[in-house]
Image: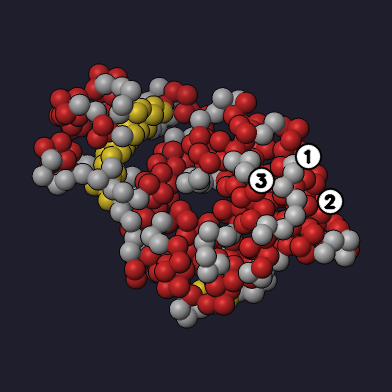
Amino acid sequence: MSDFGKFAASIKKGQLSKIYFIHGNEEYFISRSIDLLLENVVPKDQRSFNLDVFDGTETNSEAILSSILSFPFVGDRRLTVVRRFDKMEKKQRIDVADHLGDVPDSNVVCLVAGEVKTTDETFKKISGSAEVVTFNHLKGAELSEFLKDTARSLGKELGPGASDLLVDMIGDSVGDAILELEKLSLYVGDSKLIGIDDVTTAVGKSRAFNIFELQRAIGERKAARAQEIAYKMLVNGEKPVYINFMLARYFLNLLEVKHDLGKRMNPKDISSAVFGRWNPFITEYTSAANAYSVSELKKAIAVLLDIDSKLKSGGYQDSEAVVVMVSEILGGGAGSPT
């Protein structure tokens, strides 16, 4: 089991520490860890009383200490999260570290940082009082095993060599890896096995021409780039039905993001509401949602639903469908790129 898996299991079992110091360079695991604490420490109906989330670049030790030393107002537990704790001035960090021993047993404190040297004075002070959790990029065999575990959670099995090939193709980004596995899970359909051929075909030998790059180009309203990517995907054997399905899901997600932005929700809360987890590409989703009006998003969904119906009834040839997808959504740019 991965370090994140062990951490998640202990939190879900209610085996909570009073102080956590979570740090490292793998943002995906760090964000998911914070989500787990939010989900398991303070019930939703008590969060307005017993939850404080600070940003180290925008707060001071006085505000943090007021939170971590206060007893729960309602309920049994209080949670304080300090993101980017390492960005606070050293004197402020030391002030917080010096009072961690005074935190009531009813409280949970989570201090979050990037990469930290073990020789750092603040780290030494905190490590004496806190459970230190380090999440760095997974490499090689570690990442390969994580992918196999993640595939099992999706009800799939990565066949011999498939996880290693996926690592070779996507690098060490856990966020990218999970998105690609979700894509592969859809691609293989009812099959339980994801093989090397599936990875080669679905992920693509050139990651410059895949569904995620197509979504990015469409999100940025780059018609010519989107047409180029869609055409190359078709040439590489991608099925128009799959492209259409993924784009429809993309625009449905954008519509939800758009509505949540209208409620002035922050990116983290939008990610949880729309995707049920931290999505490392939430900034791209919010930017794309801002680039489209609600009526444009609804039109795009209607266009894709119509194309899906025509594809299944033989009303469109493959190449025609792909061109129409992009040109109808973005306007212009029809025709195969040269």
- Side (left or right) of 70 relative to 255: left
| Residue 23 figure quarter | top left
Residue at x 63%, y 63% (from the top left corner): 232
- Side (left or right) of 45 relative to 143: right
Q: Evaluate if marks 3 and 1 touch, with contact meaning CB atoms under 8 Å apart.
A: no
Distance, label 3 to label 1, CA atoms, is 16 Å
Residue at x 44%, y 42% (from the top left corner): 35
Single out the mark in the foreground, 2 or 3.
3
- Point out which mark residue 299 bears: 1
Which is more toward the observer, 89 or 29? 89
Looking at the image, tell me whether mark 2 or mark 1 is earlier in sequence order: 1
Residue at x 16%, y 29% (from the top left corner): 90
Q: Position of residue 182 (x, y in %)?
A: 57, 60
Q: Is residue 167 visible?
A: yes
- Residue topped by disc 3: 223
Looking at the image, tell me whether mark 3 or mark 1 is earlier in sequence order: 3
- Residue topped by disc 2: 306
Residue at x 53%, y 41% (from the top left corner): 284
Distance, label 2 to label 1, CA atoms, is 11 Å
Q: Secondary structure at mark 3?
A: helix
Single out the mark in the foreground, 3 or 1.
3
- Side (left or right) of 74 relative to 90: right
105 above or below 231? above
Residue type at tag 2: Asp
Quadrant of the image for the C terminus?
bottom right
Q: Is residue 18 visible?
A: no
Mark 2 nearby-residue class (10 Å; few <14, some 14–19, many ≥20): few
Residue type at tag 1: Lys
